[in-house]
Amino acid sequence: MRLRRLRLFAGHLWNIWIWQIVPHLAHMLSPPRNPIQAVFSWPEQPPELSPRVALFVHFDGRGNVRPYVLGYLEALRAAGISVVFVSNTGRLKPEAIESLKPLCAGILVRRNVGYDFAAMREGLSHFGLPRANTEMLVIANDSVYGPLRPLNELLNKIDFEKADFWGATESWQSRYHLQSYFLVAGPALLAHPAWSSFWESVMSVPSKRWVITRYEVGITQWMIRQGIRCAAVFRYHDLVHDIDPTLLVRDDKIDPQEIDPVLIMRRRHARRIRNFYVGRTALNPTSDLWRQLLLAGFPFIKRELLRDNPTGVPDVMEWREVVAQTSGADIATIERDLQLVVRNTAP
């Protein structure tokens, strides 16, 4: 018992060091950086934008725009959304820029200083967002594959009468927050001082931990403290309760040697989710609850999950079957991208 308490205490100290002290040191020791890091913009004049706008943040170290990203941009445009594209690459290849022009109202290329949130801040400033006619502002990025089903199915579930700030999913890891790969602000929030004051506070800090704690988690926490109503389309506790109960029943009459290993992994993960739920330990919905999300109508699958599976989700090898079951989407673009990025494993 004493050893267990010591380990818990050591883990607590480690979390404080990693999530609080290190980011603050990085912030204090980093020199002030110019928030304007643009190296290219198109068009020369401010573009016309519809009342529904998406600011899409991108990164590719080789200056490319991958086909799955173009598919996402096309889906946004098909949903009646004007897209402004902000790339953190420092340099986009000419052919990449040309592939973007038919899909985007505006393009901004900047140096990767300050990660995604610095890019968001500069994009909002550069394109003058929100504008007087802006009714909905989507902030999205290239960290997901999809959409695997019509994007309006997701957008139609967003009700600005119920909340002013929406995310596709919510997380309780670190602190409660809407996950930043897909955020949506409504007209009341866009006109509220809480929105502009948050973005004015964003700095180009060279610490990913700082960006996660102060900006990715911090934006939701800031909005809640300012009285802004926040909500997620796919709620965490609903997903946890959507586990197939048959996976939790053990049948001692069946020889374990005769059970399909895939079924064993599925059962293992279902039990893992429930164990974490009982222990009140928060999971990452887009990784650990990927199956429940797809079954609930979620239109994306995290690129990191298929590429790296960083949390060791044991049943992710069935993603193709679940996509076929839930949406029937063509996954050829995803397969081609995985062929380029996956190493030492089979997705």
Image (tube, rainbow, N blue to C red):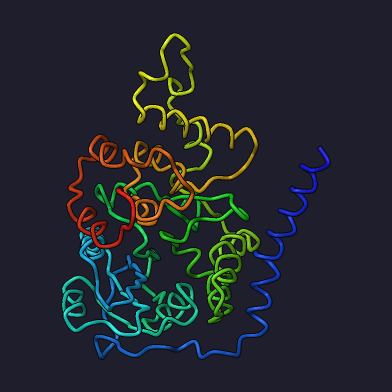
Q: Quadrant of the N terminus?
A: top right
Q: How many marks?
A: 0
Vertical side of 85 occupied by 69: above or below = above
Res 155 seen here: no
**Residue 9: x %, y % from top left:** 78, 51
The residue located at (65%, 65%) in the rendering is: 18
Q: Is residue 47 left or right of residue 22?
A: left
Please name whichever residue, 254 or 8, is drawn nearer the observer in this view of the structure.
254
The residue located at (34%, 67%) in the rendering is: 54
Please name whichever residue, 267 or 344, is drawn nearer the observer in this view of the structure.
344
Q: Is residue 118 left or right of residue 31?
A: left
Which residue reaches farthest top?
253
Query: Which corner quadrant of the image does residue 133 belong to?
Result: bottom left
Query: Which corner quadrant of the image does residue 37 belong to?
Result: bottom left
The residue located at (16%, 80%) in the rendering is: 95
Q: Is residue 82 left or right of residue 248?
A: left
Please name whichever residue, 56 or 8, is drawn nearer the observer in this view of the structure.
8
The residue located at (44%, 28%) in the rendering is: 267
Vertical side of 221 occupied by 298: above or below = above
Res 140 seen here: yes
**Residue 191: x %, y % from top left:** 50, 70
Which residue reaches farthest right?
2
Vertical side of 169 occupied by 198: above or below = below
**Residue 243: x %, y % from top left:** 45, 30
Vertical side of 245 occupied by 27: above or below = below
